[in-house]
């Protein structure tokens, strides 16, 4: 028994019970979220991303602004040139991010792992009603690791999956750009400090649903301008006003691709709501442990301290710690 328990000058006061309130849980969640920082975009990486985006917009949209004498059929031959320009720019994004202290060897290793997983997921549903499970992984990875990382991840994943499935063709550089934009957009959503839990999953599912249709629409724009022999109401007319061609494109998309993109969007929503919480926690835990933003420092005195014996340490006796026996 405690001798101080019955002293009159020190009355016994019951210790208040520890209660975990909603505010406490929110504070802990916020602290955990703040420690999970995505790969940041520095000025160099942002400049290269803007350049890649401008090249992509020009590659997709120039036929809508071309006249009848522009040689429209040459558009079908520009994919190798776009691919030749895209690969160095993707490498430039990575190099610029490394130069801005935003990506280190750990981030590059995670990029390779996620790209391999995404490339392996794509063949599971490709060619079946538009079911492509890789889209939900791009949404979650872009959300956790940031827009710059997401853009590179989306492009590299599409390139790897094209090599894996034999889908190499004039459409591949356009797919790389579009998937990069898709994952980049997930990284630009409101931060996890503001939206968390079920609301975050609903937001990501809504983005994946809308982004799946946007991906299909942008890719259809690439092929629509070079496909001949279509009906007058949905075919591309070179030199026509932009509004008229956009109206024809909407009719073309609704008639040919809406059902296909609906399957992709539905699967993305289902996988995000079913597996999104678990994968978000796993990605954030891996990002926290990797500590991409932690500076690497070397202490020259630490190595010498290992070799020197501790002062005041008891010398080893015979038979202890390998001391020689006499």
Image: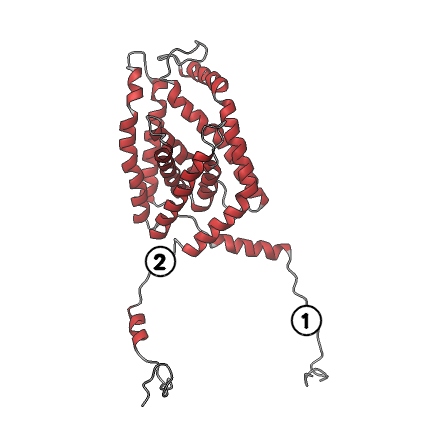
Q: Is the N terminus in the top left, top right, bottom left or bottom right quadrant?
A: bottom right
Can residue 16 be seen from the camera position used here? yes
Q: Position of residue 305 (x, y in %)?
A: 31, 75
Quadrant location of residue 314? bottom left
Question: Where does label 2 land, which residue?
Answer: 295
Mark 1 vs 2, N-terminal side: 1
Q: Is residue 195 visible?
A: no
* Coordinates of residue 182 in the picture (x, y in percent): 43, 35
Measuring 48% from the left and 36% from the top, which residue is drawn there?
133
Q: Number of marks in the image?
A: 2
Q: Residues within 10 Å of mark 2 (few under 14, many from 20)?
A: few
Q: Secondary structure at mark 2?
A: loop
Give the residue drawn at x 48%, y 16%.
251
Measured along the vertical axis of the image, is residue 30 above or below residue 79? below
Residue that badge 1 annotates: 15
Q: How far, Cα to Cα, is label 1 from label 2?
A: 43 Å
Q: Residue furthest front?
A: 326
Choose top left, top right, bottom left or bottom right for residue 122: top left
Asked if residue 202 lies left or right of residue 240, the reply is right
Q: Quadrant of the C terminus?
A: bottom left
């Amino acid at each position: 028994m405690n001798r101080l328990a019955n002293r009159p000058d020190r009355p016994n006061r019951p210790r208040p019970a520890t209660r975990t309130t909603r505010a406490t849980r929110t504070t802990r969640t916020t602290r955990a979220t703040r420690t999970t920082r995505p790969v940041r975009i520095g000025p160099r990486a942002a400049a290269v991303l803007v350049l890649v985006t401008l090249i992509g917009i020009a590659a997709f949209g120039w036929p809508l602004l071309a006249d009848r004498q522009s040689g429209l059929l040459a558009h079908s031959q520009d994919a190798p040139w776009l691919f030749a320009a895209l690969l160095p720019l993707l490498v430039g994004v990575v190099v610029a991010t490394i130069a801005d202290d935003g990506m280190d060897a750990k981030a590059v290793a995670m990029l390779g792992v996620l790209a391999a997983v995404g490339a392996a997921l794509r063949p599971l549903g490709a060619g079946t009603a538009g079911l492509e499970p890789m889209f939900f992984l791009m949404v979650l990875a872009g959300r956790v690791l940031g827009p710059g990382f997401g853009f590179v991840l989306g492009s590299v994943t599409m390139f790897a999956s094209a090599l894996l499935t034999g889908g190499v063709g004039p459409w591949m550089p356009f797919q790389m750009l579009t998937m990069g934009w898709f994952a980049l957009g997930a990284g630009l959503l409101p931060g996890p400090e503001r939206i968390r839990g079920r609301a975050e999953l609903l937001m990501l599912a809504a983005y994946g649903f809308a982004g799946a249709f946007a991906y299909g629409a942008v890719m259809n724009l690439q092929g629509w301008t070079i496909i001949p022999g279509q009906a007058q109401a949905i075919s591309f007319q070179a030199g026509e006003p932009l509004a008229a061609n956009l109206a024809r494109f909407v009719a073309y998309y609704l008639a040919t691709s809406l059902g296909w993109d609906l399957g992709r969007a539905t699967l993305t929503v289902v996988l995000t709501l079913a597996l999104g919480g678990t994968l978000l926690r796993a990605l954030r835990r891996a990002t926290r442990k990797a500590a991409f933003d932690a500076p690497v420092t070397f202490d020259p005195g630490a190595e010498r301290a290992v070799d020197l014996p501790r002062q005041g340490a008891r010398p080893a006796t015979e038979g202890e710690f390998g001391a020689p026996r006499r």
